[in-house]
Amino acid sequence: MNLVPRIVRPRFWLGLVMAATMIVAACGSQPSGNQAVTFKGTKKVGYSAPLTGQSALYGHAVSQALNLAADDINAKGGVNGYKIEMDIQDDGTTVPQAVTNTKSMILQDNVVALMGSVTSAQCLAESPIAKQNKIITIDATCNSWQLTMESDVVSPYWVSIVPNTYMEGTAAGRLAASLNVSKIFIVSPKYLFGISETNAFVAALKKANPSVQIVNDPSTWYVPFPTNPRWDSTINAIQADKPDLVYSNIFAADQINFVKQALAVDPQFFVKYPMTTLVSVDELNTLGSQYPLGMHAYMRAPFFALQNNNPRLTDFITRYRAKYNGEYPSDWAVMDYDAFTLWAQAANTAKSFDADQVVKQISGHSFDSLRGYKITIRPNELQANVGETVGTTASSSTYPFPVLKDSVNLKGDDLMMPLQMVNEIKGDQCDKTAGQPNTANFALCPSWKAS
Amino acid sequence: MESELAKLLLFTVGGLANAAYLFIVAAGLSLVFGALRVINMAHGSLYMIAAFVTVVIANQLGAGLGFWAGLLVAVAVTGAIGAVIEVLVLRRVYGREHLVQLLGTYAVSLVVAGAVRIVFGANYRTVASPIPGNIYVGTYSYADYSLFMIAAAIVIAAGVWAMLYRTNLGRNIRAAVSDPDLLNATGVNVTRLYTTVFVIGAALAGLGGSIVAPSQAIASSIDTDVLVLAFAISVIGGLGSIVGSAVGSLIVGLVVSFGILIPATSPYSLAFVFIIMAAVLIIRPRGLFGLPEN
């Protein structure tokens, strides 16, 4: 028996669904925790994210970490009494869209802070916009040292809490030198990050082992970024040159494609041509058991290597996995969570969203981090003394992807650019062409030459 | 000398593998333009859907049998989606200026990209190769799967050529390109013929996505990654010409492969592709094997 005339039924059900949706939405808007938090209003923090394109994997992880951080911050009362909401806009891993997003977030959405994008090319374009509008940017992914030192680029509102290309290249160069190889092949993406990091790698390598030979011509070190998904040419060149070691800082989709295609050419490819490479949990997780073992990896913040006696990180991993379908947090997630909480702490201490006031509470100050140690922001270039982790990939009985065996967490203080050199770069004493800061190279600095 | 010859072979096979990958993707694009005069911006979307379908099925059933099952399902799925796109979108833009067609199919590609992100998520997916071996020629190693891709490209090229020039369907397609009204008057259902052609083009995109899937990370951006080079190939070879697509793919694949071998040309190896494209556009705007539009 029909209790309601058939013609009325759809409306009845529609109304019921809408009512239920509103009730669920209302419940969901309550702050987590035992006590409801009352906010003065809402403030937005912006992030131009590569949710599509070459680095989509990283944008996905960072976005998740930032949303989790926002929840945690709001549960503790927000920032300066305001609820914080993430404003995440897809940039497709392109520079023009990152610029458009940055302008839109600042001018239309009135964000009070930005999180740095993924690629250095994007950050290089975003930094002047943020500087012009006096918006602080906490950067945890793009890492070219030029962003915080080169006089034509540097912004007083740009804070880096990621090991920069000097630090990372130095770590990689020392790692490669320790392997006692004589012939090295270099492959790197052709844009600011790749060039900056490869220069630092070569400089550190040559310093530690002057006799080492780089077998491919410098003009062949760099591949277009983003590149053709086929890596036949580079794989062929490695086979032809027969190096003892391949150095790479290709990442995300490029690294996955390169590894897959190299293993198809020869399952022993990475045994014959061992590799020192930048890796993150994302690449390890994507390839899982297909990721080659024995790779000499350097990583920015692998949770599995930072977890010992680190309850803060363990708690983060547990909550991250619970919230995001069991996904493991990548290095990018760890660092960007730190970036967001660092900014929130500084803004709360400053009792202001004003960039000058917040920077005052960051510069020279120390902050807790998921890394298990306090990080300190050096005032000269607003760079954190964050470390790098090096080790060799090995299968794991705990995780569904390889981890690093015998991993070493290098100290950031041991990797940071000497202060004198920072000042020389900022003072335009290291320019290849005098008066053109964008030609700065630390290897041209008087103090580097003297050392 | 032997070493130089071995190196030449190494880079030639690498270039051919790259060319095969590009041709497999570009073939359907070229067929659709040749027969329907539609620049299909959604071609990469169909390629992407097929890659995802293949990876999901192969990972469920196992890389060997699962891959081939995935390939069949992916081709069927993309063919079916192609039919829907043709009926709902393309029929409304046939005969209109290319800009309208571009915008229509671009809109489809945006819808598909969004749907793929919702269904498959942002994480990359990978699948093990169904042909995992390798062979040695001299001191250099070659992937069996690359050789399979080269063979697949040759079979696809021959198959499409035979379909166009050795079957009734192909005769009708060529007749429709010349004079669709006259063909209609002879009793051939041209509307259905157009749908058939687009379904074949979509299935070719699907075949390309499936074949390429084991060799790279599958993500929601692979549609645009491939479309730029596929269009470059079509412009060089001549939009609408299968032979042109094959020659264009060979030119691009070999230029990229050998470009990196020589230090002086290495930084510009990819740029050469677009320099060649620009030169072709200036000297012979319809491409090396393309026919002038009526």
Image: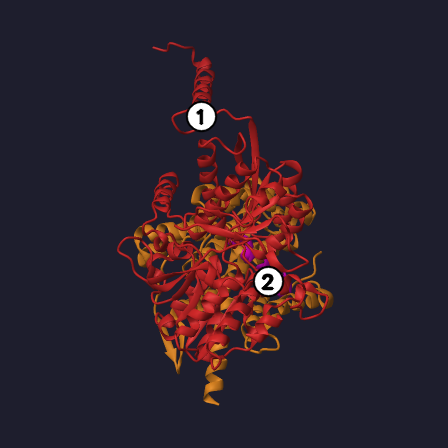
Instruction: Tell me the residue that label 2 is attached to.
Output: A422
State the orange chain.
B
The subunit carrying tag 1 is A
Colour chain A appears in: red
Q: Earlier in the sequence, mark 1 or mark 2?
A: 1
Residue bounds of the magenta highlight: B222-240
Q: Is residue B254 above or below residue A256?
A: below
The quadrant in which the C terminus of chain B is found is bottom right
Amino acid type indicated by mark 1:
Gln
In the picture, measured across the screen, residue A165 lies left or right of residue B211, that is: right
- Residue B246 lies, in percent from the top left, at 55, 67
Q: Is residue B269 above or below residue A105?
A: below
Q: Is residue B236 magenta?
A: yes
- Residue A65 lies, in percent from the top left, at 45, 43
Instruction: Tell me the residue that label 1 is attached to.
Output: A30
Number of numbered discs on residues: 2
Distance from disc 1 to disc 2, alpha carbons, whole Å, reads 47 Å
Which one is closest to the eye, mark 1 or mark 2? 2
For the stretch drawn in magenta, what is the main secondary structure?
helix
Amino acid type indicated by mark 2:
Val
Disc 2 packing (10 Å; few <14; some 14–19; many ≥20): many
Disc 1 packing (10 Å; few <14; some 14–19; many ≥20): few
Q: Is residue A135 magenta?
A: no
